[in-house]
Amino acid sequence: MINISQLNKEFESRVRLGIMSVLMVNDWVDFSEMKSLLEITDGNLASHSNALEKSEYIEVKKEFVGKKPKTSYRVTQKGREAFTEHLNALEKLLANK
């Protein structure tokens, strides 16, 4: 029997998986770089990052550089732990093939 209850629903989306994967190996990543790495639209990145921020899995920093707004992201400790647990559950699931 395969137990999928340990998978985290917050990471079901490929975009959220991508955001978390990028942030697990980088400190801060800005909006433009994240959008480019994942090849997604502004709206897609904004909506999925908002959901991850509400879950306290990522931190969003908004600032001005000169006169231009800049949005950056980083994973929180809670997010790092939740994503690691999710990946471990996926590995267990795959091992039960």
Image (cartoon, grey):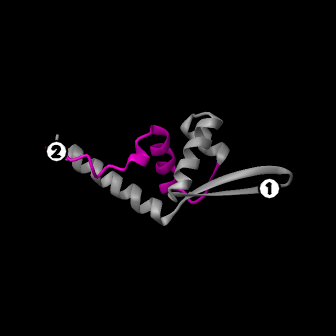
Q: Is residue 40 left or right of residue 63?
A: left
Q: Which residues are magenta?
A: 1-30
Which one is in front, 26 or 58? 58
Residue at screen point 48% across, 66% down:
77
Q: Nearer the viewer, residue 36 or 41?
A: 41
What quarter of the picture does the C terminus occupy? top left
Residue 44 position, x and y percent, is 58, 37
Q: Which mark is residue 16?
A: none
Q: Secondary structure at mark 1?
A: strand
For mark 2, give the secondary structure.
Answer: loop
| Residue drawn at (36%, 50%) of the image | 8
Residue type, label 2: Asn
Q: Which numbered dot is residue 96?
A: 2
- Is residue 71 rendered to the left or right of residue 86? right
Q: Position of residue 72 (x, y in %)?
A: 65, 54
Left of 97 or right of it: where is 12? Answer: right
Q: Residue at left 39%, top 46%?
A: 9
Q: Residue at x 74, y 51 (%)?
A: 70
**Quadrant, the N terminus:** top left
Q: Is residue 13 above or below residue 92?
A: above
Furthest residue to the bottom? 77
| Residue 11 lies in the magenta stretch | yes
Which residue in the structure is indicated by mark 1?
Answer: 64
